[in-house]
Amino acid sequence: MPLNPKLRVFLDSNVIFSGLHSSEGPSGVILEHFINGKLTVVISQQVLEEVVRTIKEKVPDALLALKRLLTSVPVEIVKNPTPAEIAHWAEKIHPEDAAILAAAIAAQPDYFITGDKGFLKNHYIEQRSGLHILTPAQFLGYLKA
């Protein structure tokens, strides 16, 4: 199945970090599709801040790669959710994850791609949010199908 250039994916910070850390893994392949213009990547301001913080703490040498990524192809950055939007989901998931979830819902992507088991193993969230939540590997499998 050819990639649809209009396919919008909301990436969790762990996907971006993993993709920058290893270009050969599923997250790296997703970033490569984005760089090649085959996907539109959507993130929230909080996701961007998490990625920067994690890279600074764990692999500061990768900051340049992140900068190149963000300046080479435009990323759609959505605003952080309101406290009310976060509170709605915080009853069902960890409060920090609730902010990411609320931002992903507001962005209305075709897919929410994450490696966070808190999202992946909580079927209530997928049912109630309307999001299609996949791991990077599952998403790549979908693209190949």
Image (cartoon, rainbow, N blue to C red):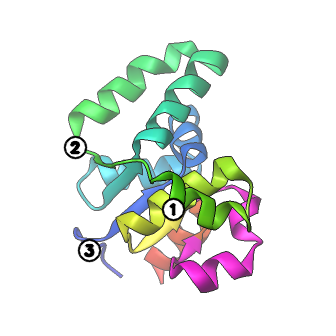
25 to 127, vertically: above or below? above
Instruction: Report helix, strand or loop for mark 3.
Output: loop
Q: Which amino acid does label 2 sit on?
A: Pro
Q: Does the magenta stretch include residue 127?
A: yes
What amino acid type is highlighted by mark number 3?
Asn
Per the rendered image, the range of residues in magenta is: 114-133
- Nearer the observer: mark 1 or 2; the answer is 1
Outermost residue toward the top in this view: 61
**Which residue corresponds to mark 2?**
74
Give the Cα separation between the discs numbered 1 and 3. 30 Å
C-alpha gap between disc 3 and disc 2: 17 Å
| Residue at numbered disc 1 | 85
Q: Where is residue 74 in the image (x, y as percent from the top left)?
A: 22, 43
Q: Residues within 10 Å of mark 2 (few under 14, many from 20)?
A: some
Say what secondary structure mark 1 lies in: helix
Comparing 116 with 44, the one in front is: 44
For the residues labelled 1 and 2, the Cα–Cα distance comes to 26 Å
Q: Residue at x 57, y 33 (%)?
A: 21
